[in-house]
Image (cartoon, grey):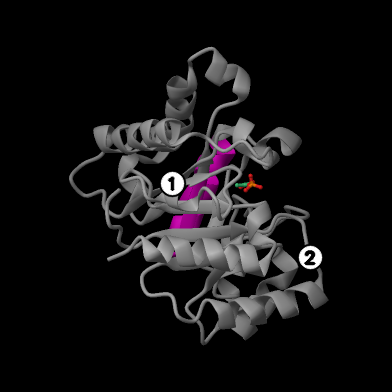
Amino acid sequence: MSSKENVVIIGNLKMNGSLVFYDSYLKKLKESLSNLRQVTVGLCLPYPYLFLAERLLKQSKIKWGSQNVGKFSHGAHTGEVSSEMLKDFSSTYVIIGHSERNTAYCESEENIADKFKMVKEWGMTPVLCVGETLIEREAGIMESVVQSQIKAVVSKYGADIFSDSIVAYEPIWAIGTDTAASPEQTNHMCNFIRKTIKKDSSQQVSNVKIIYGGSVNQKNTVQLFGLESVDGGLIGRSSLSTDEFTSICNLADSLSN
Ligand code: PEP
């Protein structure tokens, strides 16, 4: 296991919580994560609570952001939220192409690519989710599935757009199931993603982080995030508990020099 620098841990709070919950949750995390040395922590919240994150976390090391974004800049797009609006609340991270959205709202690969581009234009960090279903893994086609998800962005905007962005390998079968990918599976796919992006890019592409998401908890954190190919994690359920999330961040921090 290698010593790690610049690990990033991002909580995906999904459609959970309330004003009362986030008031207490954000204050607790601000306190409990105040001594982290190397790890960068982000929280992707439901849109209505971004104002609270900006208010409560401004003086902390924790960054915040959203779980989706509209692909257009403004206009007649009822129900959408633009990158500019997210920027108004000092957002850093924007999750794009999460499988729960792709399945429930038929998100197209073209939309995902356009969202990625818009987030970059506004100076925020896209967290692009890629990953295969169980059927696809059992058929042995996980590499081609993930490659096509990455290519959807690359073919429209070029691989260099991945500079200063994050790709989250999230096998769909591991999300919310208590069955995380094994270290071998994670290592293989994170290396594959890195190679796929590098292959199409010029020398210019830099600072691409590849993180893992899917049933991470404090028991498997060190095993997964200690892998050389893995730059951190996207944490769903385990981010809802301040104790569990704090433990995960501390464990990830202990992997650094
Ligand atoms: C997710 O949905 O991004 C996720 C990683 O969820 P969980 O940790 O609950 O599997």
Left or right: residue 32 compared with residue 165: right
- Within the magenta stretch, is there residue 223? no
Tag of residue 223: 1
Say which amino acid is labelled 1. Gln
Reply yes or no: does residue 111 show up in magenta.
yes
Residue found farthest to the top: 139
Amino acid at the residue labelled 2:
Gly
Question: Residue 34: where, in percent of width, then height?
Answer: 49, 81
Q: Earlier in the sequence, mark 1 or mark 2?
A: 2
Whether residue 41 is situated above or below residue 96 in the rendered picture: below
- In the picture of the structure, the residue carrying the numbered disc 2 is 17
Task: Residue at 73% x, 38% y: name it.
Answer: 105
Residue projecting furthest to the left: 203
SS at mark 1 in the image: helix
Q: Secondary structure at mark 2?
A: loop
Q: x and y percent of residue 61 in the render?
A: 47, 78
Nearest-to-viewer mark from 1 and 2: 1
In this rendering, the answer to whether 182 lies above or below 86 is: above
The magenta stretch is: 110-128
Residue 30 visible in the current orientation: yes
Numbered label attached to residue 117: none
